[in-house]
Image (spheres, helix red, strand yellow):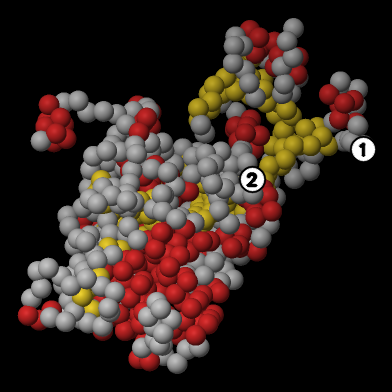
Amino acid sequence: MARIPYVIVDAFASTPGAGNRVAIVLDARGMDLEEMRSLARRLGEPETAFVTERQGTLFAVRFFTPSGEVEFSGHAAIALGLTLVRLDDLVVVEGFHPKVGKVRYFGMVDLVAKAHEGESFDTDVFLAVQGKIPVSLAYVAHVSVTRIVPEEFFPPDPGSAVYLARGEDLELALYYDAMKNQRGSTKLPAGFLKSGEVAYLNLEFLNGVKGGHVNISGISGVAAKTSYATFLLKSLLESEVLEEAHQARVLLFNVKGEDLLFLDKPNLRLSEEAKEEYRRLGLPPTPFGSVRFLAPPKKGEEGILPDVETRLEGVKAYHWDLVQFAQKGLLPFLFTDKGALTNLGFLVAHVTEKLRRLAEGQKGPHLLVADWPGGELPEDITFDDLGRVRLKSFSDLVRYLEYKLLGPETGEGEGDRTWVARQARPTLEAFVRRLRSSVENVGHLVRGDRKGNPPDPLEGGEQVHVVDLAKLSPQGQMFVVGSLLSDLFAKKERGQYRGRVFVVLDELNKYAPRDEESPIKDVLLDIAERGRSLGVILIGAQQTASEVERRVVGNAAIRVVGRLDAAEAERPEYRYLPTSFRQRALILPQGMVILHQPEIPVPLLVRFPFPAWATKREEVLEDNSAEALRREFF
């Protein structure tokens, strides 16, 4: 006869051997009535429970005494609940206080363990399995209290009945009942709990009312940082919880591959079960409906063609013209390393201001200068432009600055004193060397041959703006990110757009490093510390939060952790997680994250649905309808 595992539980007892003994057969699938009746007689316990089916937190159970089947057993039901309790289960216990009456304790199971009571040595386990020594199998669960109603801090009685928290009890356990304001609910769908219930974030800790910003950590490729960030965007824009969501704008940087260039395409791998999960979350199982895609232009092309490979339609190239570069003061974003700022900071700021004044009143795209013998006179010269020459490329601009700072290329004479700002010649030469080296990296991004078309998420009718950085050099990526964020933040400071703007940026450790200074880091610090009051919310991600500026991470009200490296998990930045959660973060599968928010004193293990939008060309569900073909080709 096959071995049938079972456990013995002492219900309503604080010590082994006391209370009511119950035998529990955890897997009775395939057993018929006679087999259950026979086993219950052989075990000889007052009550035996057989688990015949399980779906999530729902169980099908049959109860027996040695004499036969019974309709229900309270002792066995409570013992079964204790035996089957799992990590992350939410539970409730009731107690009584003479002065306040009933007190309810809510909590989450954060540790479970099994042990043989009666063993003296580790090797006794083998004797116990063989039935040679008497032991009892103990199943122990540790619960972290999340809430006490009313707040009377005294312990419940030993042996008090423990129940799974459902419905209203679950709402109380996770403070969902408090997630509301005068306009209605602020519960933002954030995925699913392990029990299958919907997990929620309090929107007011994300939209800037009580807090703002999200920080996501995890190993690249397995932590699903970008996937969860885009899922949060879907929830923000389409759950109808965010007030005036139609006015919200998203600036989403694509830093790796071309994964985010298909947000507007349905995913052919999306199953019916996944679609149903979206509906349970109150979200449509559809791709993003309003997206603009922008990519850098190809190098060496006279025209402006986007440098992408897997998507050939619907992507526009972006660049800045020379006048925009000068007027917006973008020069500092070419000097983003610590060494440059230490020695050249004053000179960079001075030249930036000189360029801004030089470009005043000019419309571009070329930059007109009056005192450079190396330039060419424009053919279509106007009276106002007499005596001035035209800079038609970033390379021309670098040569002009070299002339103003170091003098003629022949080596005769010195630079313009109004430009050199009393800096020593070695400092000026170091500045020029860095500018020369940047021509290859950003020459195709800053041009004088045609009007600039830089990304601007506050303009146009699209709600989501995806800006591709994947093929740019590190310096090019730094320049684009710094230029866009500084311009966006300046416009919000001036009140040019009233809606909220969500910025999604991966690799924060590169743009806001802990031990280095840069203009981009200054902008990100401004967003982290003042952005929520202006309606600019950062959804930042990185592999290692320990390498990111503390104030950027610390100002995030919502923290999300995917799979972590073992060494990283022990860093102080993750001490807000209990030890058991830090250990579990080492083995989290894709699609699972640990979510922490201010109102709930314990982290939540959350599963989010499979993307409804394609994440690469191979996943695109093609629409071959006549209307789709007409839009694409005509």
Q: Which mark is residue 120?
A: 1
CB atoms of marks 2 and 1 within 8 Å: no
Q: CA distance from mark 2 to mark 1?
A: 33 Å
Mark 2, mark 1: which one is toward the viewer?
2
* Label 1: few (<14), some (14–19) or many (≥20) C-alpha neighbours in 10 Å: few
Up-down relation of residue 287 to residue 508 (above or below): above
Given the image, on which type of amino acid does mark 1 rest? Ser
Dot 1 lies on which element? loop
Q: Is residue 28 above or below residue 290?
A: above
Identify the residue at horizontal 21%, vertical 55% (top origin): 246
The disc label shown at residue 26, or none: none
Q: Residues within 10 Å of mark 2 (few under 14, many from 20)?
A: some
Give coordinates of residue 410: x percent, y percent: 41, 78
- Position of the C terminus, as image quadrant, is top left
Q: Residue 546 in the image: x percent, y percent?
A: 60, 62
Between residue 365 and residue 149, name the one nearer to us: 365
Q: Nearer the viewer, residue 617 or 357?
A: 357
Label disc, if present, on residue 586 of the rendered structure: 2
Which of 410 and 100 lies nearest the eye of the viewer? 410
The amino acid at mark 2 is Leu
Q: Nearer the viewer, residue 441 or 320?
A: 441
Residue 444: give x, y in percent of width and height.
32, 57
Q: Does residue 187 lie above or below 121 as drawn?
A: below
Local SS, label 2: loop
Taking 285 as reference, is 553 left or right? right
Residue at 82 percent across and 34 percent down: it is 116
- Do we see residue 221 in this rendering? yes
The part of the image, by quadrant, that contains residue 323 is: bottom left
Pointer 2 or 1: first along the chain: 1
